[in-house]
Amino acid sequence: MKISVADAGSTATVVLDGRLDIAGADAVALPLAKLADEKLGLIVDMSRVSFLASVGIRHLMAAAKTLTRRGGRLVLLKPTALVEDMLITTGMNSLIPIARSEREAQAVLTAALQE
C-alpha cells in the first residue's frame, strides 16, 4: 500500500494506492491516526484501492470518529466499484460520506466545518 498526503492547512487529502488488507492497513494506520488528530478535515482518495478488508474499514472508522469528536469530518473520494460495494454492504456509507469528485468532497468538508 502506497500512501501520499497533500497538506492544505486544516485539511489534507490522503491518496491510497494498493490493497487495504492486513498489510495495507498496517501501512496506513499510523498516518491516518496522526492526521485525524491534527486536521479538521480529511479526504481519503480511494480511487486506487483495489481491495478493502475489515481491518481497513476499522482504521477508516477510527479516523472518522476521531475527526467527528473534534468537530471535523472524513470523506471518502471515488472508491472503486468493489470497494464501494464493501462500504455499502457494511453500512459504512451511512457513517462516512462518499464523494464522486474532488469538488463534491470539498463541499462536504466545507459544510461540515461550518456547522
Image: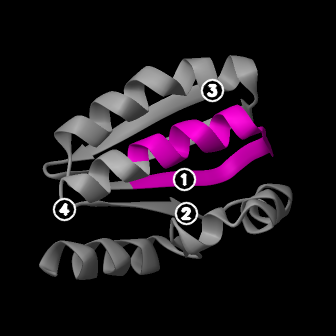
Dot 1 or dot 3: first in sequence order is: 3
Chain part drawn in magenta: 43-63
Residue sitting at x 41%, y 78%: 103
- For the C terminus, the image quarter is bottom left
Q: Is residue 18 visible?
A: no
Q: Earlier in the sequence, mark 1 or mark 2?
A: 1
Q: What is the C-alpha distance between the residues marked 4 and 3?
A: 25 Å
Which quadrant would residue 80 be assigned to in this image?
Answer: bottom right
How many numbered circles are shown? Answer: 4
- Asked whether the residues under the numbered discs 1 and 2 touch, taking CB atoms below 8 Å apart as contact, a structural biologist would say yes
Q: Which residue is mark 4?
A: 71
* Quadrant in which the N terminus is drawn: top right
Closer to the camera in the image, 2 or 23: 23
Measure how far apart labels 1 and 4 are at the Cα level: 21 Å
**Residue at mark 3:** 25
Q: Distance between the Cα atoms at labels 2 and 3?
A: 17 Å
Residue 37: horizontal and vertical position, in percent? 23, 37
Structural distance between the alpha carbons of marks 4 and 2: 20 Å
Q: Which residue is mark 2?
A: 77
